[in-house]
Amino acid sequence: MQNEKQTAYGFGTRAVHMGNAVDKETGAIKRPITMANSYELPYDPTDMNWSSAAGNLYTRNGGANQKYLQEKLASLEGGEDCIVLASGVAALSGLFFALLKQGDHVIFSSVTYIAVYRLLNELFNTKFGVETTIVDTSDPENVRRAMRPNTRLVHIETPGNPTLSISDIAEIAEIAHAGGALLSVDNTFASPYNQRPVELGADFTIESLTKYINGHGDAMGGAIIGRTEHLDLIRAQSQINLGATISPFNAWLIMRGAVTLPLRMRQHNDNALAVARWLEAQDGVSFVAYPGLESHKGHETAKKQMAPGFGGVLSFGLKADHDTHNRFVSQLKVITSAVSLGHDASLIVFLGEKDERQYLYPEEFSNGFFRFSVGIEDMEDLIADLQQALEAVGLS
Ligand SMILES: *Cc1c(COP(=O)(O)O)cnc(C)c1O
């Protein structure tokens, strides 16, 4: 299918076939894992560029399994090109490192993955002289007001981790481009099944492959999707010189996991919406944040840019004190207390009320809250598990 136009087939067909081919040596109908870290040199190698990402040379410069996965993800995200790296954070830092220089200005969402906050609010500004502004990007007007002549990049996350805030990708892309800036969107919570930022006008989509795209909680990876002109720069400057290359085995695992992305996302979408509605109806629950709920502030924007569903992550709180939140988690039997998200299994994490970024979150998050990644188990079992835990702590 490599030579077919990316759009000639549906999402599910491309999830299965893109990046795969018959192995020429053995005839195997699945491409093998190539663990070698070095490739045969030409007769006279002396005029080679040892920092080149073109061709097969050395696995830090790009390996076979990485390239197969890049083909699949560029297709699923509707992008021209893709770089796969060792983690979601490697993708984020690789993008920032290649794009930003001293004197540039960056605008980023008040709700982002914690490493983005550290990189832009603590490292790039103090170590490299990059100006950074945090804004609530759920209102695009805040982005417009924050734009400066030297704004190089706007970085948003939608839905945002951990409050599920929604930002309008198409509108923010217009504002960024009008000011001569680029837009990157962390799409990890939605996955390309539900939302494809580059198709909506963003210049870059970032994915933590560790989450939905691998989907089984057993490998780490990250991806940047965008145009080749930008991605060649990131390859040359970040992948090869920062060295956060994905291992061939992890690239292979993620390639395998991604095949079932559409099937899993359908179940995540359905389960999360049902659980969110159920939680919202419970007296002991103080709030539920899920973009699929009519009560969510960003619901209309989410409906416009997310389809067919709203993902598997939600946040909620209990009408109870700090320790009751911990007791509730300790009573759960199906749902596991662990960080990460987008696994087959349901995962919950109590984030308390002392996050250093609490001042950036809506009021209802100030009494402690859970981030809940709803898995693909049977919905009835998840709701029964939540019900019995609420009863056990006297909230039902
Ligand atoms: C987990 C996560 C990341 C970081 O990905 P890693 O693979 O853990 O490095 C980035 N963004 C979001 C939204 C995430 O949830």
Image (spheres, helix red, strand yellow):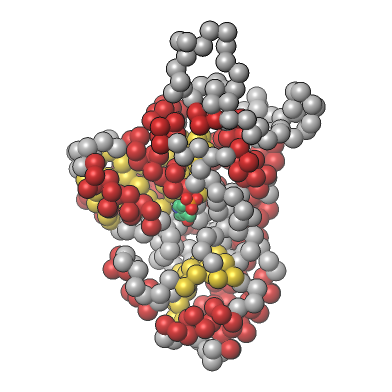
Q: Residue furthest right?
A: 27
Residue 279 vertical position relative to residue 88 in the rendered view, above or below: below
Residue 179 in sight from this viewpoint: no
Q: Residue furthest bottom?
A: 394
Residue 372 vertical position relative to residue 248 in the rendered view, above or below: below
Q: Which residue shows up at 45% across the image and 10% down it?
A: 47
Residue closest to the eye, 98 or 185:
98
* Side of 190 relative to 29 (left or right): left
The percent coordinates of residue 394 (x first, y second) are 54, 92
Give the quarter of the image for residue 345: bottom right
The percent coordinates of residue 291 (x first, y second) are 48, 63
Q: Which residue shows up at 58% across the image and 35% down it?
A: 66
Residue 262 vertical position relative to residue 1 in the rendered view, above or below: below
Residue 262 in sight from this viewpoint: yes
Q: Residue furthest top?
A: 44
Q: Which residue shows up at 55% across the image and 71% down it?
A: 337
Residue closest to the eye, 353 or 377:
353
